[in-house]
Image (cartoon, rainbow, N blue to C red):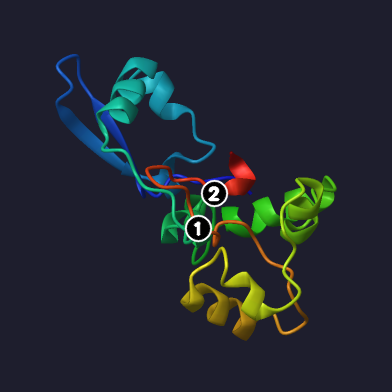
Amino acid sequence: MGPLPNTDHVELRDESFTLFEKFPLRETYLNPSLLYNGGLDDVVRGMFGQKAQHVHRFTTEEIRGRLMQRFFQNHGYDLTAMSIQRGRDHGIPPYLQWRKFCNLPIPDSWEDLKEFMKEEYVDSLRDVYLAGLDFGHLNQFNYPKLDLGRKYT
């Protein structure tokens, strides 16, 4: 799964880049009606008019469990989980195998991870991944002035 936007809404802006409407992301995912009703220009201006977001290791609630909620009563799709599964379906190797492929150091223990991840992230991963070091890339340190770490650069 690559870096995801951390916004939870889609903005529409007019020719002067004035915001005139916002929609929750769950109402717009796989829903082209905004393009038909308002036009692509309003959507694109909305994207350009939004403040740039930092990539971080968590996704918003909209992405994590509310997409396409308009079709379901109490739940929606979890794009994060779907992306992880899609990667597995397509044979994308787990994080540590990818590090090996890129000739990057491979940690042998949870302690080794602290060389390129924050200690609090390592502790959280250890609590969740009881079977060992098999987790994602969004936890690694980012390069200075970049929102990306070694895997994406």
Residue 94 placement, left or right of 124: right
Quarter of the figure with residue 124: bottom right
**Mark 2 falls on what kind of element?**
loop
Q: Whole-percent x and y of residue 69?
A: 49, 55
Numbered circles on residues, count? 2
- Mark 1 and mark 2 lie on one chain; the one further toward the N terminus is 1
What's the residue at 77%, 48% (across, down)?
103
Labels 1 and 2 touching (C-beta < 8 A): yes
What's the residue at 52%, 64% (across, down)?
75
What's the residue at 62%, 71% (across, down)?
113
Q: Is residue 81 above or below residue 7?
A: below
Residue 72 placement, left or right of 128: left
What's the residue at 60%, 42% (across, down)?
152
- Packing grade of label 2 (10 A; few <14, some 14-19, many >=20) is some
Q: Is residue 12 above or below residue 91?
A: above
- Amino acid type, mark 2: Gly
Q: Which mark is residue 43?
A: none
Q: Which of the two residues, 144 or 12, is positioned nearer the viewer here?
A: 144
Q: Is residue 88 above or below residue 29?
A: below
Residue bearing mark 2: 149
- Amino acid type, mark 1: Phe
The quadrant in which the C terminus is found is top right
What is the distance, in whole Å, between disc 1 and disc 2 at their CAs? 6 Å
Q: Whole-percent x and y of residue 144?
A: 40, 47
- Packing grade of label 1 (10 A; few <14, some 14-19, many >=20) is some
Q: Which of the two residues, 95 or 12, is positioned nearer the viewer here?
A: 95
Residue bearing mark 1: 141
Q: Whole-percent x and y of residue 40?
A: 39, 18
Q: Which of the two residues, 27 or 147, is positioned nearer the viewer here?
A: 147
Q: Whole-percent x and y of residue 13?
A: 23, 25
**Mark 1 falls on what kind of element?**
loop
Q: Which of the two residues, 112 or 69, is positioned nearer the viewer here?
A: 112
